[in-house]
Image: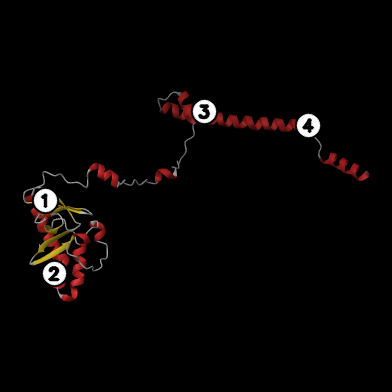
Amino acid sequence: MEKDGNSKESEMMIYQPLPAEVRVTLAQHSLLSGSTQSNEKKLEDRFLMSYIQPRTSVIPEELTAVFKKNFPLWVSRPANENKKTRTRKKALTSIEKRKLGLHKLPKTGIKYKACAPLHQLWVEYMEKFLELENSTKAANKDLLYQRIAKADYHGCLLMVTRSKCPSYIGTKGIIVLETKNTFQIICEDDQLRIIPKRDSVFTFNVSKWTFTLFGNHMNIRPSERAARKFKSKPTIDL
C-alpha cells in the first residue's frame, strides 16, 4: 500500500500545470509572431501593388483577387487521356449480310460481254496456278487434281454436260458467283442462271486441255475448299 501511494505522488510531481507567468509569456510571444507575420505580408502586398499599379490599367481590387489565387507550374494529365482508344470496325454478321442481299446477284443488268474480260483474267490465273506443262505429266497428276479442287472458279466459262435435270444439260456461261451448293452463271443471252452442283457434271477448257468437274465433290464453300485437303474418290456415273 505504501508503494502505491509513492507512485501516485511521483506522477503528481511529473505532470504539473505550468505556472501562470510562463503561460502569459507564451501567449505574448505567439501574438507577437503572428503580428510580425501579418505585418510582413502586408508589406509584401503593398510593395507589389506599388510596383504593378502604375504599370497596368487593372483595378487594385482585381489585382488583390489575382494574388490570392494559386497558379500551379505543372498540371498532370490523367493517364486515360494520354492513351489513344482504338476503335475496331464491327464486321457484318451472316444474318445482316443476308438481309442486305450481299449473297444475291440481280437477275437483270449483268451483261455477258462485260464478263468476258473476267474470263480472260481467269484463264491467265489458271495457267499460272496449274502449271499445265509440268503438272499434266503422270508423276504430277495428284498435284494437278489437288490444285483443280482448290482453284477459284469466278470467271470460268463452264458448261453442264450431265445432270439429273435434263433442262440444265448444255447450259453454258461465265461463273459470276459460286456458293456452297450452286454455280451462278451469266449466259450469252444475258440471263443469270443458277445451276446446282449436286448431281451435275461440268466441263471447262484451259488452253488446249479440257477438264471435268463433278459437282458432288464441290459441295464446299470456296473459301473452305482452298484450305482443305482432298482425297481421291471414285466417281460414279449418274
Q: What residue is disc 4 on?
A: 21
Label 4 and label 3: CA atoms lie apart by 38 Å
Label 2 and label 1: CA atoms lie apart by 27 Å
Task: Return the disc, 2 or 4, that comes first in the chain's sequence.
Answer: 4
Classify mark 1: helix, strand or loop: strand
Q: Which of marks 3 and 1 is in front?
A: 1
Q: Residue at x 26, y 45 (%)?
A: 97
Residue 184: % across, % down? 16, 51
Label 4 and label 1: CA atoms lie apart by 116 Å
Along the line of sight, the residue nearer the viewer: 165 or 34:
165
Q: In this view, does 228 lie above or below 191?
A: below
- Dot 4 crowding, Cα within 10 Å, few <14, some 14–19, many 20+: few
Q: What residue is disc 3 on?
A: 46
Q: Which of marks 2 and 3 is in front?
A: 2
Q: Nearer the viewer, mark 2 or mark 1?
A: 1
Q: What residue is disc 1 on?
A: 186
Label 3 and label 1: CA atoms lie apart by 95 Å
Q: Which label number is shown at residue 132?
A: 2
Which quadrant of the figure contains the N terminus?
top right
Q: Nearer the viewer, mark 4 or mark 1?
A: 1
Task: Return the disc, 4 or 1, that comes first in the chain's sequence.
Answer: 4
Residue 187: % across, % down? 9, 51
At label 2, the amino acid type is Leu
In the rendered structure, are the residues bearing label 4 and label 1 in contact, judged by CB atoms less than 8 Å apart? Answer: no
Task: Return the disc, 2 or 3, that comes first in the chain's sequence.
Answer: 3
Task: Return the disc, 4 or 3, that comes first in the chain's sequence.
Answer: 4
Classify mark 2: helix, strand or loop: helix
Which quarter of the figure has residue 101? Answer: top left
